């Protein structure tokens, strides 16, 4: 299949390169940067004569940029998941994905094939969304209960994990929160006849390998901190991330709801999971606040006009308020625009809605003299409001953080030092027109915006690596993979100065090595994987 000009070139299959490939360094990469940038994403969109339909359906590939002494090597490897192994063996799509429904095995007898149409699609373990360490273990994850254990040194697949053996959830997000002591928090949905749909905050205590032995896993330390009842017992809201501060968790129930009957009939109707969600503009978003110390849900009902959000930027506490910074779409149209048939169009024939950087403020405690329709937000530096309603709820209106005609997505911060705390800067990709054709840094206090852009280049999520001698929040470097679509030039690892947001150097990958546009990842210092969040 011939790739078109423009951003559509990024959404075609690539080969894996198991052995490290040397890169050509242009400029200079600071010698103190010593570790690996790990990223994952879709890599193979065709199996035999069949093809996946959706961007998040492509078989997962892991990318590794190893950085040491100012030099960089690149290698990649397909995750040997069940989805991958069975597809390669059968030379067809075996497990259903977000937007692609797998057909019944043609080798089954006619009765087995007939009845398989009336069962929900099998859950795939195609873990292409994110990769991260937990204690001394490393995982690639999707948004299901099936994770893949990875060796970050060799990129070997070490095995598949069924999370339901450790915790009673049907799915977990791909964006957990990590504490300095190694504790990890995540959120996952569950469904049962007794409780209906629930959203669960899950805690993974760090693993002490000396006490537990070599066969133990950090997943055995899972426990549920709190279960939040869904507004509709038979419909769960879709969510991709959540907020966490020193004392609170914040979950947003947004009005993109799973249609259970449609899920059950998905195979016979030949539609993917993306077609089994309904958007309800008339239903407001609900912010649910949970105390970390006891798992109690704050009784105040916080609402906002409907919006759709993939990513939380940061959440922090200040003067009796919770401040949430989010990348928000007006609605969920973006979900339907990630089909490959749309992404592969020429740039002039496609567009994307522009997500806005918004700030919402949630007053934790209301004064006794608070009047209906009065703004309960007392922070002087924001225009965000939260007005008391007659039913006792607080309806929130956001501050729009940037007036620039450009969307913001894939946000990151100096996570290890500022997650859940007041902060100054965040970094991300600019989403407008054809795709993410710019990278940016924003000062959330002054609203100043720095931009990196190069014609025909499309940058990924930026990962902040703090300087070992750094004092200020933006002392460090930012790493991003960039795909250059002009004349099949390939890709490069971009290194930006965290303070000035100017290019320090780049590691150019040979043109014959294809690197697709990935999703998420992390930086692993030159140490044991489990030490990543302690060392930084």
Image: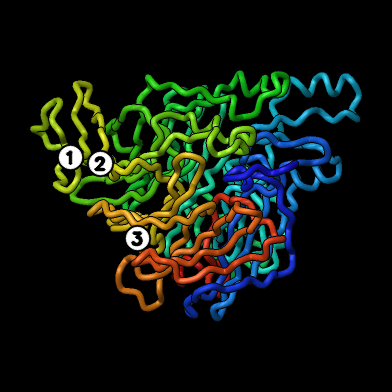
**Mark 1 or 2 closer to N-term?**
2
Outermost residue toward the front in this view: 487
Q: Which image quarter: residue 209?
A: bottom right
* Residue on which the image places disc 1: 377
Neighbor class of circle 1 (other Cα within 10 Å; few <14, some 14-19, many 20+) is many
User: x and y percent of residue 89 in the render?
Assistant: 86, 45
* Residue on which the image places disc 2: 361
User: x and y percent of residue 76 in the render?
Assistant: 69, 60
User: Could you tell me if the residues under marks 1 and 2 are in contact, i.e. CB atoms within 8 Å?
Assistant: yes
Q: Is residue 1 visible?
A: yes
Outermost residue toward the left in this view: 369
Q: Which residue is drawn at 42% across and 33% down?
A: 308
Quadrant occupied by the C terminus:
bottom left
Provide the secondary structure element on which disc 2 rests. strand
> Rounded to the nearest whole Å, what is the CA distance between mark 1 and mark 3?
23 Å
Lateral position of residue 186 relative to residue 276, left or right: left
Nearer-the-camera pick, 451 or 49:
451
User: x and y percent of residue 522 in the render?
Assistant: 53, 60
Provide the secondary structure element on which disc 1 rests. loop
Q: Which image quarter: residue 354?
A: top left
User: Could you tell me if the residues under marks 1 and 3 are in contact, i.e. CB atoms within 8 Å?
Assistant: no
Q: Residue 418 carries which label?
A: 3
Q: Residue at x 50, y 74 (%)?
A: 27
Q: Residue 483 carries which label?
A: none
Nearer-the-camera pick, 417 or 310:
310
Provide the secondary structure element on which disc 3 rests. helix
Nearer-the-camera pick, 44 or 221:
44
């Amino acid at each position: 299949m011939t790739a078109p000009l423009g951003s559509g070139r990024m959404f075609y299959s690539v080969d894996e390169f198991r052995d490290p490939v040397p890169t050509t360094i242009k400029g200079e990469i600071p010698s103190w940067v010593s570790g690996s940038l790990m990223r994952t994403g879709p890599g193979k969109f065709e199996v035999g004569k069949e093809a996946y339909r959706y961007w998040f359906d492509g078989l997962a590939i892991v990318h590794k940029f190893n950085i040491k002494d100012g030099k960089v090597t690149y290698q990649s490897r397909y995750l040997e998941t069940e989805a991958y192994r069975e597809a390669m063996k059968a030379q067809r799509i075996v497990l259903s994905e977000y937007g692609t429904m797998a057909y019944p095995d043609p080798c089954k007898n006619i009765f087995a094939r007939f009845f398989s149409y009336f069962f929900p699609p099998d859950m795939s373990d195609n873990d292409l969304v994110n990769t991260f360490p937990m204690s001394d273990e490393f995982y690639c994850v999707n948004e299901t209960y099936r994770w893949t254990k990875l060796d970050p040194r060799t990129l070997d697949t070490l095995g598949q994990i069924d999370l339901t053996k450790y915790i009673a959830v049907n799915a977990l997000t791909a964006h957990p929160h990590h504490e300095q002591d190694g504790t990890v928090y995540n959120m996952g949905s569950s469904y049962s006849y007794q409780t209906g749909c629930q959203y669960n905050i899950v805690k993974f205590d760090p693993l002490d390998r000396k006490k537990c032995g070599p066969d133990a896993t950090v997943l055995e330390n899972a426990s549920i901190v709190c279960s939040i009842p869904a507004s509709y017992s038979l419909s769960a809201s879709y969510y991709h991330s959540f907020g966490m501060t020193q004392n609170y968790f914040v979950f947003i129930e947004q009005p993109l709801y799973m249609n259970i009957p449609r899920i059950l009939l998905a195979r016979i109707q030949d539609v993917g999971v993306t077609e089994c969600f309904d958007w309800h503009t008339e239903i407001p978003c609900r912010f649910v606040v949970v105390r970390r110390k006891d798992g109690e849900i704050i009784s105040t009902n916080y609402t906002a006009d409907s919006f759709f959000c993939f990513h939380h930027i940061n959440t922090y506490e200040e003067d009796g308020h919770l401040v949430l910074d989010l990348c928000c779409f007006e609605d969920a149209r973006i979900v339907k625009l990630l089909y490959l048939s749309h992404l592969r169009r020429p740039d002039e024939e496609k567009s994307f809605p522009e997500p806005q950087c918004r700030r919402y403020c949630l007053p934790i405690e209301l004064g006794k003299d608070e009047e209906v329709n009065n703004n309960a937000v007392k922070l002087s530096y924001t225009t965000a409001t939260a007005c008391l309603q007659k039913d006792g709820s607080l309806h929130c209106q956001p501050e729009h953080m940037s007036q620039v005609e450009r969307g913001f997505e894939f946000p990151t911060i100096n996570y290890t030092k500022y997650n859940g705390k007041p902060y100054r800067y965040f970094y991300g990709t600019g989403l407008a027109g054809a795709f993410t054709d710019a990278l940016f840094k924003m000062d959330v206090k002054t609203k100043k915006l720095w931009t990196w852009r190069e014609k025909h280049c499309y940058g990924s999520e930026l990962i902040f690596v703090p300087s070992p001698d750094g004092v200020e929040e933006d002392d460090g470097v930012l790493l991003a993979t960039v795909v250059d679509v002009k004349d099949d030039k390939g890709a490069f690892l971009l290194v930006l100065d965290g303070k000035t947001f100017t290019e320090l150097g780049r590691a150019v990958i040979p043109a014959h090595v294809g690197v697709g546009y990935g999703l998420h990842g992390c930086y692993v210092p030159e140490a044991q994987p489990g030490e990543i969040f302690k060392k930084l």
